[in-house]
Image: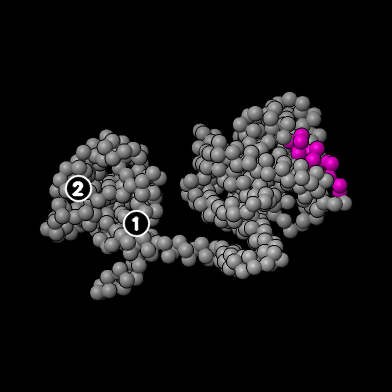
């Protein structure tokens, strides 16, 4: 083993060699990056080392990343294997079928019979994913990265423990502590308030008045979690963090006997996240539950403007689901019911901004649904214009709200589609230019906001398609490139977001 390394002074030294089929290149890249950036806990580092130990594991070899432009590819791989302290095999049916993976395993074991070989199962069952050469000789240390196995987080820690030859428990405890600190840093204020609420609720059992006061505090906290905190989480653009916020709020209501409109709000947000993952059936189930809640509350208080607005929101939300599925008749039925509700609200009893917002949503949804069907374009334009007018009024009431400005930008886009459908191409392209300008201004004010980046990516892609339809190919290509760059950044930030992955694939097709 050691003699092999000493015999070749030119051999590079790596902490581990990643062997994989190119079908698993994305997983290999992710694993490579995470291992090289991982830091061991301070108490597990080498305190006797001559140089300061920062806890990093060291360089990891992955051929696409580290292979030089050598004439002899196999020599380069041999040198890397000779200089590696461990071997990580990304296991999948493709890896099992790869002769190169098999050869790398055999060569590493021949060079270093005593060094660790780690199997990272990513697809398929072990019997169809483990290369035969991996099962020969000593049994490899295995980490199941599949969701139904160890999962990515625990599986990754098993690999780190195998490379560093440290106890897995120590890494798991450190990881749990770090996750807690991270969540506390993001949601510290909300969690402190929630703990206060829980503690006070115990004492509130002693009197009804105290219980009512605590219920009011709980409602306020949940509303904060669904508005300000949710908006911050949405900006970060990580679905698992938003899930934790939603579930924490829903856990509160699972202990309550009475229905609350906030329950419906939580269900709508959870359904939106399901749709982002591509789980449309789960989303529909949640939209329907939310609709039943707001309908029940409205039946109990039919003249209550808050109940009317809540139910209008539920109608718009489930209508959007049907529209995305191409079920336009059902979508239109819900959108029309929503518009009837907001039109019937007594203007003096409702929040003017919320009423304008929901009315604009209803008109915009009717506009989009008629346009997507390609019929009654004049009626579509009428709803588009009303939605735009209401969005402009809303921005005057909420001049500092980026959400209101985003709604305004989207209304410009739909009105542009209506004009183009009516052959008012020049006017439509002007509307699209206004749409892009507003989106760019929003993103420029918060360049790290993932939610705004997603909207910008969608806007660039839509603008590129329109430009291409009217033979503005150079400008179209420029916007496709801009949209693709944004889509790549978004997918790298959260690979679990199915919508971002679909957008990246669509943009890739547009480039070709």
Residue furthest top as drawn:
375
The answer to whether residue 94 is left or right of residue 406 is left
In the depicted view, which residue is nearer to us: 334 or 298? 298
**Residue 67 seen anywhere in this rendered image of the structure:** no
Name the mark on residue 157. Answer: 1
In terms of secondary structure, where does tag 1 sit?
helix
Q: Position of residue 438 (x, y in %)?
A: 70, 49
Q: Is residue 343 magenta?
A: yes
The answer to whether residue 382 is left or right of residue 413 is right
Crowding near pointer 2: few (<14 within 10 Å), some, many (20+)?
A: few
Residue span colored magenta: 335-347
- Residue at 65% of width from left, 43% of height from top? 290
Q: Position of residue 269 (x, y in %)?
A: 61, 48
Determine the image quadrant of residue 137.
top left
**Of marks 1 and 2, which one's residue comes earlier in the chain?**
2
In the depicted view, which residue is nearer to us: 27 or 488? 27
Q: Report the predominant secondary structure element of the magenta stretch.
A: helix
Q: CA distance from mark 1 to mark 2?
A: 19 Å
Determine the image quadrant of residue 369.
top right
How many numbered markers are drawn? Answer: 2
Q: Position of residue 309 (x, y in %)?
A: 76, 46
**Residue 505 seen anywhere in this rendered image of the structure:** yes
In the depicted view, which residue is nearer to us: 315 or 79? 315
- Residue at 79% of width from left, 36% of height from top? 383
In the depicted view, which residue is nearer to us: 152 or 475? 152
Image quarter (top left, top right, bottom left or bottom right) of the N terminus = bottom left
Name the mark on residue 332. Answer: none
Scheme by which the image is coloured: one colour
Name the mark on residue 139. Answer: 2
């Amino acid at each position: 083993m050691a003699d092999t390394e000493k015999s070749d002074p030119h051999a590079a030294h790596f902490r581990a060699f990643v062997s994989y089929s190119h079908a698993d290149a994305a997983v290999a890249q992710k694993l490579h990056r995470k291992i090289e950036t991982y830091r061991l806990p301070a108490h597990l580092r080498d305190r006797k080392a001559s140089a300061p130990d920062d806890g990093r594991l060291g360089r990891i070899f992955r051929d696409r990343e580290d292979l030089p432009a050598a004439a002899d590819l196999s020599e380069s791989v041999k040198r890397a294997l000779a200089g590696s302290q461990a071997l990580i095999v990304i296991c999948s049916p493709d890896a099992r079928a790869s002769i190169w993976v098999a050869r790398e395993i055999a060569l590493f074991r021949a060079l270093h019979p005593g060094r660790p070989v780690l199997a990272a199962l990513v697809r398929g069952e072990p019997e169809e994913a483990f290369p035969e050469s991996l099962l020969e000789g000593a049994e490899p240390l295995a980490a199941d990265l599949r969701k139904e196995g160890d999962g990515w987080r625990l599986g990754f820690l098993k690999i780190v423990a195998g490379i560093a030859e440290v106890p897995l428990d120590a890494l798991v405890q450190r990881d749990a502590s770090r996750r807690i600190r991270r969540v506390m840093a993001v949601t510290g204020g909300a969690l402190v308030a929630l703990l206060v609420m829980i503690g006070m609720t115990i004492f509130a059992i002693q009197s009804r008045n105290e219980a009512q006061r605590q219920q009011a505090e709980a409602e306020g906290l949940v509303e904060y979690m669904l508005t300000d905190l949710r908006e911050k989480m949405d900006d970060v653009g990580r679905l698992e963090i938003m899930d934790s916020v939603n579930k924490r709020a829903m856990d509160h209501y699972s202990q309550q006997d009475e229905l609350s409109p906030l329950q419906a709000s939580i269900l709508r947000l959870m359904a939106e996240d399901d749709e982002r993952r591509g789980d449309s059936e789960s989303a529909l189930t949640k939209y329907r539950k939310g609709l039943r809640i707001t309908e029940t509350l409205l039946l109990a208080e039919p003249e209550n403007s808050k109940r009317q607005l809540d139910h209008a929101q539920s109608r718009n939300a489930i209508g959007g689901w049907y529209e995305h599925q191409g079920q336009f008749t059902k979508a239109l039925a819900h959108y029309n019911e929503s518009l009837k509700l907001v039109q019937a609200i007594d203007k003096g009893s409702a929040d003017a901004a919320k009423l304008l917002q929901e009315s604009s949503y209803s008109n915009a949804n009717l506009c989009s649904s008629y346009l997507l069907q390609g019929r009654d374009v004049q009626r579509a334009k009428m709803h588009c214009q009303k939605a735009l007018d209401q969005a402009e009024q809303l921005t005057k009431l909420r001049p500092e709200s980026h959400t209101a400005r985003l709604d305004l930008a989207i209304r410009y886009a739909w009105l542009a589609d209506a004009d183009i459908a009516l052959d008012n191409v020049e006017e439509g392209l002007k509307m699209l230019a206004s749409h892009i300008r507003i989106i760019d201004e929003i993103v420029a004010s918060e360049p790290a906001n993932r939610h705004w980046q997603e909207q910008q990516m969608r806007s660039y892609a839509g603008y590129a398609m329109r430009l291409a339809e009217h033979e503005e190919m150079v400008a179209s290509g420029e916007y496709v490139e801009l949209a693709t760059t944004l889509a790549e950044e978004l997918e790298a930030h959260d690979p679990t977001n199915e919508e971002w992955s679909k957008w990246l694939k669509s943009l890739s097709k547009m480039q070709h």
